[in-house]
Each structure stands twice: as C-alpha cells, then as structure tokens.
Amino acid sequence: QHSTNTSRTARMADAFAKPNKLKDASKKVIATNRVQDTEAKPKLKKKRRKLPDQKVIDKLQAKLRAACMDTKPQKFFSKFDKDKSGDLSVKELEKLIRTSLKITKKELSEKDISALVQALDDDQSGSISIEELGDFVEFGAATFYGNEVTRDGSTTKWGESKGDSEAMKNIKRKSRAKKRKKLDEDLMEKFRTKLQAATFGQSPSELFKSFDKSGDGLLDASELTSLVRKELKIASSELTDDDIKQFVNAVDDDKSG
C-alpha cells in the first residue's frame, strides 16, 4: 500500500513538473530568437529633425557669405570655436548666428539650429567643421545629410569673390590707398608712437599675442581696439572704434579682416 501511494505521488509530481519544463524550454527558444532577430536587424538611423523654412536657410547662407566678405572664414569660425576643438557645437553655432548674423530666435529657434547641425554633420560627430559649414555657404541645402555635390565653376567658395579680375584687384588696392590718406596723420602718428612705447623693452610679438584672443596669429578690429584701449590707453574720444576699423581696413592688404 505504501509503495502504491509513493508511486502515485511521484506520477502526480511529474505531471505538474512537465508543463513547467515545457514553459522554461519555450522561454529559452523565445529568448534565443530575440537575440538572433536583434543581431539580424540593422541599426536604425537617427530620426531626421524637421528643418526650418527654405527662406530662413537661404537667409542664413547669404548672411554667412556676407560675414566673410572682408574676413577670412577661418578667422570668423575660430572666434566662436571657444574650446578650440576645430568644430562648432550647437551652442557655439547658435552664438555665431545670434551675435554675428543677428538672426533672432523667432526666425531660427534652438531646435532649428540643432536640426541644421544634424543635416550638415557629415561625419556624425554632433558638431560641424569649417569644411561642412563652408560647403553649406557654397552649395546651400544641396549638401544636407551628406549629399554629394560637384564643383562645376557655377558656385563660389566661402570667403572668395567671384570674378575678381586683375583690374578689379587694382581698383581695390587704389581704394585702400585712398583710405590710408584719409586717416588723420597726427592721430596715426600718435598711435604709432604709443605702440612703439608699449613695445619698448619687450618683444612686439608678445604684446601682439596677448591680445590675439582667437590664437590665429591675426588681430581683428575688436582685438586691436582692446589693445588700443587697455595697453596704449587711447580713449574713444581720441580714437573712435570706427577709426580703428578704418585703420584695419586701410592696412589690411590681403583682406583677412
């Protein structure tokens, strides 16, 4: 009797265990299939953000081109590359757009700028290089999302003026020479004398470097203004900011700004 009861109990335990064993086996199959499916599926690309209106894109392109008519793109770009990484982050590009191009948030929101960075960021680094921005200035929206473009002579590189013949270059040189003559000679003599005094006993290059905030080996009008005010102690009542800009334009033979 005892043996019969034991056998019956064992059969009942086995009957209850079988569904659980089947359930565990089923789970293993599902898990295995899920792993296989995951490995087989390609990685999804980042969802493209909605771009701003074409008119705004065209305006941004035109303003970027205009900003470098008298300044080299590299110098302009480096002003906003605060971490000196060689790329502009979304925040750095936004500062460029707001402070230099004067494009408001109403025209181009932060989300729009993020979408533009995504569209221009060919290497998916999360930021844009001067080459990527330069391609946009030259070709516009045609470069978005890594689209290939061909330089066929119908476009102008960023920072270049189309059709500048030798004759036109000569005209520009004469124009700059006239500007030099217009500058007040006494004022420029004072400027020269103070500059000589400031570099007495030290290397002029060291003084130059201390005001070259962008570190590109050049002084733009704002950097020179800082030097004039802080180091030469020439007040704006004696030499205005416009006078300094005029001076920079007059001596800037290569139009680097």
Image (spheres, helix red, strand yellow):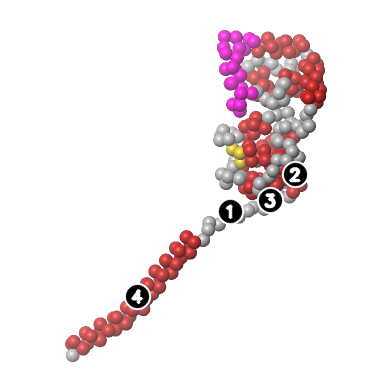
For label 2, the residue is 58
User: Which quadrant, please, contains the C terminus?
Assistant: top right
Residue 208 horizontal/vertical position (percent): 61, 19
| Location of residue 61 with respect to 18 vertically, above or below | above
Can you tell which mark lies on residue 51? 3
**Residue density around tag 3, few if under 14, some if 14–19, many if 20 or more, within 10 Å:** some
Report the magenta residues as a range: 196-218
Q: Earlier in the sequence, mark 2 or mark 3?
A: 3
User: Which quadrant, please, contains the N terminus?
Assistant: bottom left
The three-letter code of the residue at mark 1 reads: Lys
Q: For marks 1 and 3, give the CA distance.
A: 14 Å
For label 4, the residue is 21
Q: Earlier in the sequence, mark 4 or mark 3?
A: 4
Give the left or right position of residue 111, taking residue 7 as reference: right
**The stretch drawn in magenta includes residue 133:** no
For label 1, the residue is 46
Question: Going by the picture, which residue comes out furthest to the bottom?
Answer: 1
